[in-house]
Amino acid sequence: MKTKTWIGLSLAGIALTLGAVQTLQAQSVKRVILQRTDLSVPGREVVQGVAELEPGGATGRHTHPGEEVAYVLEGTLTLEVDGSPPKTYKAGEYFVVPAGTVHNGKNASGGAVKVLGTWIVEKGKPLASPAS
């Protein structure tokens, strides 16, 4: 693939990702996408990033077009998943959210919460979509 084409596709992917999480960022969440790459499974890609929630912050109810595998790097996070009681995760713990499941992460600590997220998603779809 030519370098210009690769750069164009990479920039388009970043723009889609940023647009998809713009609504969520407005709710005291800072997200930095670290990498995004195709998988060997056709039509699937992996996206990895770090989300930081301010004290009292929340992601807002949302879904992903694939699984989310997350690891709490710092602080304490309360995860609300529709149909399940809220669970609290501390630094060093992980959780998995199934594809299409409505969920909301809340900062349950006095300081910042940092979470490393890995999403295995359908390529070309927004990384996150707000839930009603």
Image (cartoon, rainbow, N blue to C red):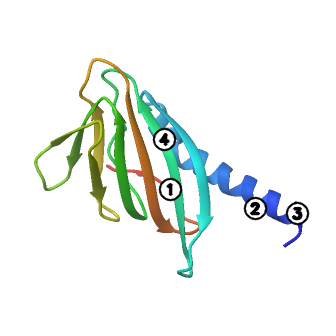
Dot 3 crowding, Cα within 10 Å, few <14, some 14–19, many 20+:
few
Which residue in the protein does label 2 denote? Answer: 9
Task: Please report the residue visible at 30 percent of the width from the left and 29 percent of the height from the top.
Answer: 75
Q: Given this view, does label 4 or label 1 mark the residue nearer the observer? A: 4
Query: Most extreme residue toward the front, as rendered?
Result: 92
Query: Tag 2: residue type?
Result: Leu
Task: Say whether residue 113 is left or right of residue 88.
Answer: right
Separation (CA) of disc 1 from disc 2: 16 Å
First along the sequence among labels 3 and 1 = 3
Q: Earlier in the sequence, mark 2 or mark 4?
A: 2
The mark nearer the N terminus, 3 or 2, is 3
Does any portion of residue 47 appear in the rendered image?
A: yes
The amino acid beneath tag 1 is Leu
Between 122 and 110, the one nearer to me in the picture = 110
Which is closer to the viewer, label 2 or label 4?
4
Q: Which residue is mark 4?
A: 50
User: Cα distance, mark 4 to mark 1?
Assistant: 14 Å
Local crowd size for mark 1, using a 10 Å CA cut-off: few (<14), some (14–19), many (≥20): many
Q: Are marks 3 and 1 in contact (CB under 8 Å)?
A: no
CB within 8 Å, label 4 to label 1:
no
* Disc 4, SS: strand
Assign a secondary structure to mark 1. Answer: loop
Single out the mark in the foreground, 3 or 1. Answer: 3
Q: Pinpoint residue 34: horizontal percent, then vertical percent.
A: 59, 47
- Which residue does the numbered mark 3 point to in the structure image? 3
Q: Nearer the observer, disc 3 or disc 2?
A: 3
